[in-house]
Image (cartoon, rainbow, N blue to C red):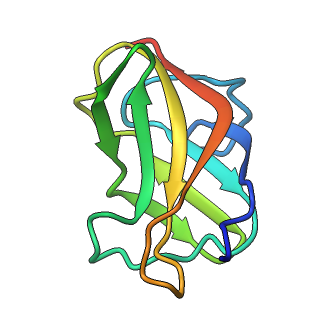
Amino acid sequence: MRSIPEQRIAEFQEQDYQLYFGISKAGMCFRIYGKNLGFDFEDEKQGVFLALKGDRKKAVRITSFIRRTQRTIDAILPQDMEKGVYTVSFVKKNGEGSYPVANTTDEIEVIE
C-alpha cells in the first residue's frame, strides 16, 4: 500500500509573500511544500484541511488557491475562519481508491 509522503508546512505568508511565522489572519496566504501534492479539486474528500485544535468537528477544506503544483501549494485562509489554532492535513486519493491522510505537526494560529 502506497502512502502520501509527509508534507512540510514551510512558510506562512501574507499576500505579498513575506514570512509570517505561523500566525495569520483570515484571508491571508500560507504555503505547503512537499512531494506529490497534486489532488482532484472536484473530489471533496481530497485537498488541504484545517481542523480547529481541540474540536476536530470544526474542520475546514481549503478551496481558494493562488498556486497548486506537485511540490507547492499556496492557499488562502477562508475569510470566515474563527480565531484559534488549527492543525493542517492533506488528503489525496491513492491508486487503491482509499484516502490516506497526511497529518502534519504544523499549526496555523488565526488571530482575527
The residue lying toward the viewer, choosing from 61 and 104, is 104
Residue 99: x %, y % from top left: 44, 67
Residue 63 position in % (x across, y down): 32, 57
Instruction: Give the residue at the far front of this rendering.
Output: 1
Q: Nearer the viewer, residue 13 or 87?
A: 87
| Quarter occupied by residue 17 | top right
Residue 18 vs residue 5, the one in the foreground: 5
Decide: is 104 above or below 91: above
| Percent of width and height locating residue 62 | 37, 51
> Residue sitting at 53 percent across and 30 percent down?
87
Q: Residue furthest bottom?
A: 95
In this view, the residue in front, 33 or 4, is 4
Is residue 26 placed above or below 111 in the rendered structure?
below
Q: Residue most toward the left? A: 80
The reply, left or right, for residue 111 in relation to residue 6 is left
Residue visible at 42% across and 46% down in the picture? 49
Residue 29 relative to residue 112: left or right: right
| Residue at horizontal 72 percent and vertical 23 percent from the top | 21
Whether residue 53 is situated above or below residue 58 in the rendered picture: above
Q: Is residue 13 left or right of residue 75?
A: right
Displayed quadrant of residue 106: top right
Number of marks in the rendered image: 0
Instruction: Name the residue: 74% across, 33% down.
Output: 19
* Residue 14 x %, y %: 58, 36
Residue 1, quarter of picture: bottom right
Q: Quadrant of the C terminus?
A: top left
